[in-house]
């Protein structure tokens, strides 16, 4: 049966994103379908209606608060007075 790859994956079977592949082993196909990695391309299979594509708007990142004072590194080992 033929499937469209929704998420690239690698393992016993490997496929890149948006590829059309054929999987003969039904157990592997069922596992990938349940995980949401593939969808069936054949019309006799029951499939969910396709969702409309939405345009992803860029996400504005919030500024990161920087520490007010630089962090001082501590030395490990013996002090100069120890000897």
Image: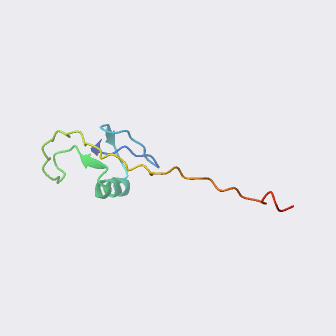
- Compared with 2, 69 (above or below) is below
- Compared with 73, 14 (above or below) is above
- Compared with 63, 46 (above or below) is below
> Where residue 53 sits: x, y (%)?
15, 41
**Residue at position x 36%, y 58% in the image:** 27
The image's colouring method is rainbow
Which residue reaches farthest front? Answer: 81
Locate residue 6 relative to residue 44 in the image: left or right.
Answer: right
> Where residue 42 sits: x, y (%)?
20, 44
Which residue reaches farthest right? Answer: 83
Locate residue 9 relative to residue 52 in the image: left or right.
Answer: right
Locate residue 75 relative to residue 27 in the image: left or right.
Answer: right
When asked about the image quadrant of residue 22, the answer is: top left
Of 63 and 54, which appears nearest the observer?
A: 63
Which residue reaches farthest bottom? Answer: 82
> Where residue 82 sits: x, y (%)?
83, 62
**Residue at position x 39%, y 41% in the image:** 15
> Where residue 30 sits: x, y (%)?
31, 57
Of 5 and 63, which appears nearest the observer?
A: 63
């Amino acid at each position: 049966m033929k499937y469209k790859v929704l998420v690239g994956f690698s393992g016993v079977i490997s496929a890149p994103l948006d590829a059309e592949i054929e999987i003969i082993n039904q157990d592997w196909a069922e596992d990938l379908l349940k995980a949401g990695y593939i969808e069936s391309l054949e019309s006799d299979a029951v499939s969910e209606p396709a969702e409309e594509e939405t345009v992803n708007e860029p996400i504005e990142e919030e500024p990161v608060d920087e520490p007010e004072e630089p962090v001082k590194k501590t030395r490990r080992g013996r002090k100069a007075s120890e000897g």
